[in-house]
Amino acid sequence: MAIWYASPLSLRVENFPSFQELWQTILQQQEPEVVEWSQTLVYNIWDVRNRVLFRNGQLVVGDVIDRAVGMLAPASPVVREERGGTKAVWGRPHERVIKLNVDASFVDGKGAGLGMVARNHLGEIMVAATSHPIPVLPSLLTEASGFRWTLRLVMELGFRRVCLETDCLQLYQWWQNRTVGRSYLDTIVSDCRSLVSYFDVFSLSFVRRSSNSVADFLAKNASTYADCVWVKEVPDVVSGLVDLDVIASRLVSP
C-alpha cells in the first residue's frame, strides 16, 4: 500500500476492495503513462515479494520505486521516423538472406498486437504472423518483445540467414548500445543477443515506417488475425501492400 501511495501515482489502494477493481479503474482512465507506471509497479512489487520470501531480502519502499523509475527511464514515447532511417521503400535482401520486418501496435486499449513478415530476395512471402494480445507494457518494451518474438519464431522455422528491420529508433539505438543495465528492457535485449548467436547471418536496421507497412498493418489488425501464422501467403487484405513493396523494390538495390 505504501508503495502505491509513495509513487508518482499517489494511489490509496486501500480504497479498492480488490486488485481487480483497482486494475479496472486504472485501465478505464485510458492514460498511457498511468498504465505504464502501474504495470511497472506491479512487476517490481512482485519481484521484491519474491526476494523477501525466497532470498531473505528486505522490503524498502524507496528501492522499489527507484527500480520502477529505472525501468521506465528508456521508455519515452516511441519515435517512428518518417524522414529518418535509410530507406523510404521496402528493399529486397541479398540472395539466400531472409528479410524480417516487425512492428508492434496497441490494440483496442486492451493490450498490444505484434506483426511480422519474412520475405526472400524476390519479395516472395516466406512467412507472416501476428500475436495478440500481449500484456500492457511501455511502448519500447512492447517493441522489444516483438523483436524477441520474431527471432524465436524464425528460429523454429529454420531460417539461418536473416536481416531484420524496425521503424522504432529507440529499439535500434538500444541494440547498438552494448552496455548491460538492470532494466526489464536490458533483459529482453540480452535475450535477443543470445538468440542471434543461432544465426549464420544477422543484422538489425532502422528504416522508415513507409518501408515497414506490411508488418505495421498486421500489428494494427492483430486482434482480427489473432495468433496466426501464414506460410508462403498473407491474408488477402494485405496482398496489395505486399505487391506495392515488390514494385517499389525494383528501384532499390539490395
Image: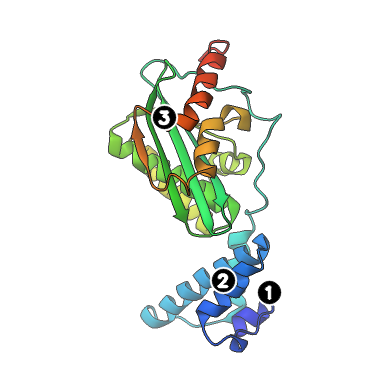
Residue 251 position by quadrant: top right
Estimate the x, y position of residue 145 in percent, counting from the top left: 47, 49
Estimate the x, y position of residue 136 in percent, counting from the top left: 53, 60
Estimate the x, y position of residue 32 in percent, counting from the top left: 65, 60
User: How far apart are the two marked residues, 3 and 2, measured between alpha carbons?
Assistant: 36 Å
Q: Position of 238 compared to 81: left or right?
A: left
Task: State if disc 2 and disc 3 touch (CB < 8 Å).
Answer: no
Residue holding disc 1: 9
Kindly identify the residue that appears in the image at 48 percent across and 59 percent down: 135
| 20 w.r.t. 211: above or below | below
Among the two numbered marks 1 and 3 on one chain, the one whose residue lies closer to the N terminus:
1
| 180 w.r.t. 96: above or below | below
Determine crowd level at label 2: few under 14, some 14-19, many 20+ residues with C-alpha closer than 10 A.
many
Q: Secondary structure at mark 1?
A: loop
Task: State if disc 2 and disc 1 touch (CB < 8 Å).
Answer: yes
Q: Secondary structure at mark 2?
A: helix
Q: Can you tell which mark lies on residue 41?
A: 2
Determine crowd level at label 3: few under 14, some 14-19, many 20+ residues with C-alpha closer than 10 A.
many
Residue 95 position by quadrant: top left
Given the image, on which type of amino acid does mark 1 rest?
A: Leu
Given the image, on which type of amino acid does mark 3 rest?
A: Ala
Residue holding disc 3: 118
Q: Is residue 230 visible?
A: yes
| 158 w.r.t. 194: above or below | above
